Image (cartoon, rainbow, N blue to C red):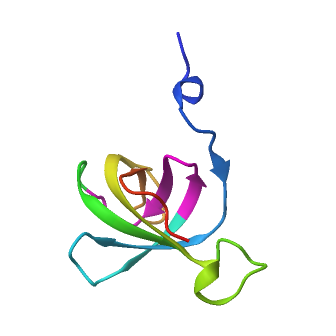
Amino acid sequence: MTSTANRREFERQRKEVRVRYSLLGSEEYSDARLVDVSEGGLCMETSTPLRTGTQIYVQLLNINPEISGLAAHRTSHGRVRWTRDLGCLEQTRFGIGVQYTHPVCH
């Protein structure tokens, strides 16, 4: 049986970065925490579940600490591939898998 990690097209990198996301067409952003990122997508942790197939904008904040200003942020457009209840006792948390649908903008 092939593990999930072996089926991935791109290598995932774990990052502790703040994330903001919005639904496509909305100007209202919500905060999230990045779990990992690759060339093909990312995994983030949110307090709200997102429906599979939902198109979103994701903004990674201060992805490169050596750079300041807008150049330190990365914005991408993606589609929610999965949502999982993380089962946290203290607060409701969801893992969200996002596949990029357009190249990442720097």
* Left or right placement of residue 84 versus residue 61 in this view: left
Magenta span covers which residues? Answer: 34-50
The quarter holding residue 78 reads: bottom left
Q: Quadrant of the C terminus?
A: bottom right
46 falls in the magenta region:
yes
Across and down, in percent, residue 88 comes to 47, 56
Across and down, in percent, residue 20 comes to 45, 75
What residue is at 52 percent from the left and 9 percent from the top?
1
Residue 82 position (above or below residue 101)? above
Residue 81 visible here: yes
Q: Tag count in the figure? A: 0
Q: Residue furthest bottom?
A: 69
Across and down, in percent, residue 9 comes to 53, 33
Residue 70 position (above or below residue 4)? below
* Left or right placement of residue 53 versus residue 73 in this view: left
What residue is at 59 percent from the left and 53 percent from the top?
36
What residue is at 79 percent from the left and 79 percent from the top?
66
